[in-house]
Image (cartoon, grey):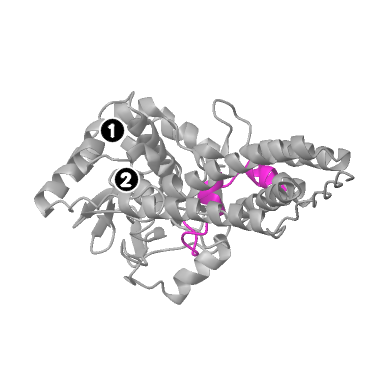
Amino acid sequence: MAGVAVSVYLTAVHVAGFAPACPVAGTINCEVVLSSGYALIAGTSVPTSVAGIAWFAVSAVLWSLRLPRPQLAWSVVGMITVLYLVFIEIVQLGAVCLWCTAAHVLVLTIFLIAAGRR
Amino acid sequence: MAAKRPRPMRKPVSTTPAWAQPAALAAGLAVVVAGFLIYRYYTTPPPPNPLKATAAQAVVDSITGLPTSELDGIGQGSAKQLIVPVSGQALNGPTGKPEVFYMGAEYCPYCAAERWAMIIALSRFGTFSGLQTTSSSSTDVYPNTPTFTFHGASYTSQYIDFRSVETTDRNQNALESPTAADQALVNAYDRGGSIPFVDFGNHYVFAGSTYLPDVLAGMSWQQVAAAVQQPSSPQAKAILGSANLVTAAVCKLTGDQPTSVCSSATIQALEKKLG
């Protein structure tokens, strides 16, 4: 549920829009990340955070149905996506969004719990 | 003799703690992320050498000598309209004319992008001298965006005063400090403290850049200047579109003077958009 909440917040921020700008804080910069082209799912106008909402929702369903193998497989999908997004933040953009990182940590936590249950 | 009963096999007991596998996975992921950081460090390109004064002036002359017809043809281009009306005591500059105030920093890639548009726009109302080239930070987003700096430059105009504060150089070393009055403007109209911040006489303000700096990625100053000569180029649509928005805001300050700039249908339409 926390993951859904963070993803919904990120989607709301994206939809509200904001100007690309430098903050006082420097590298920790949600504006840079969320105003980049990578904030949208490739080839669409759908914010990447919407995919996060979907991922967390499916994860919650799998968890409640107690399906360890599909849960682990879904967690692996989420983890691979997180690694890609972290690569984009660090290598391509040189900026880290703390809210995105919160969502990534939640995915990591779910992945580690699913892996530990095997 | 009775056959010996086979000894029951012991159930294998795992000697590996339950937390070991997740810990190993977490450590592996940490190594991957560390690899990203190392890759970024070693692939960050060095900044280009700044142009000498004569070459820099040639670039400025090129971008400020564009025909009005090209600017008018671009309109808003691909620039995002960020300029908003504000109400405050009229902001006048050192010579008593309406003041355009800019605050930014040399490291900032969004400031780097916006300065191209501001130089083109403000050159329609006056003349810059002493503009030097620089590029945005090598370690920030959109690294090494080619640009100019307002630090050390001067501007003269019969219509407006222009005052700039570049707070840091491209390596984030302190350069210029805003006055208390400057900071009061930022506090009033730019609560997030985002830069670039531009105040048009306390009638209009905007914070941020009206186009993303990625359109200038990997280009030299001369290449940017050449690209803005081509109306169909993404650089022309972004930079000249932004310049037209800034021009419209300045025209509102000057009562549509000079008419050669402000009376065009394009600028008049953009003025209406500003409100």
Front in this rendered view, residue A60 or A91:
A60
Relative side of A39 to B53, left or right:
right
Secondary-structure class at tag 1: helix
Where residue B242 appears, as percent x and y from the top left, is 41, 40
What is the crowding at mark 1: few (fewer than 14 residues within 10 Å), some, or many (at least 20)? many
Place residue A59 in its image quadrant.
Answer: top right
The C terminus of chain B, quarter of image: top right
Residue reaching furthest to the right: B2
- Give me the residue at 36% from left, 44% from top: B257
- In reply to whether residue A23 is colored magenta, the answer given is yes
Relative side of B223 to B201, left or right:
left
Magenta span covers which residues? A9-34
Q: Is residue B26 visible?
A: yes
Badge 1 vs badge 2, beta-carbon distance below 8 Å: yes
Amino acid type at image mark 1:
Val
Where residue A118 appears, as percent x and y from the top left, is 74, 45
- Give me the residue at 57% from left, 35% from top: A40
- Give me the residue at 39% from left, 60% from top: B104
N-terminal-most mark, 1 or 2: 2
Identify whether B201 is placed above or below A3. Answer: below
Label placed on residue B228: 1
- Give me the residue at 43% from left, 30% from top: B77
Residue reaching furthest to the bottom: B180
Relative side of A13 to B122, left or right:
right
Label placed on residue B116: 2
Identify whether B42 is placed above or below A64. Answer: below
Front in this rendered view, residue B150 or A30:
A30
Subunit that carries the residue with mark 1:
B
Secondary-structure class at tag 2: helix
Identify whether B137 is placed above or below A37. Answer: below
Front in this rendered view, residue B61 or B38:
B38
Q: Is residue B144 visible?
A: no
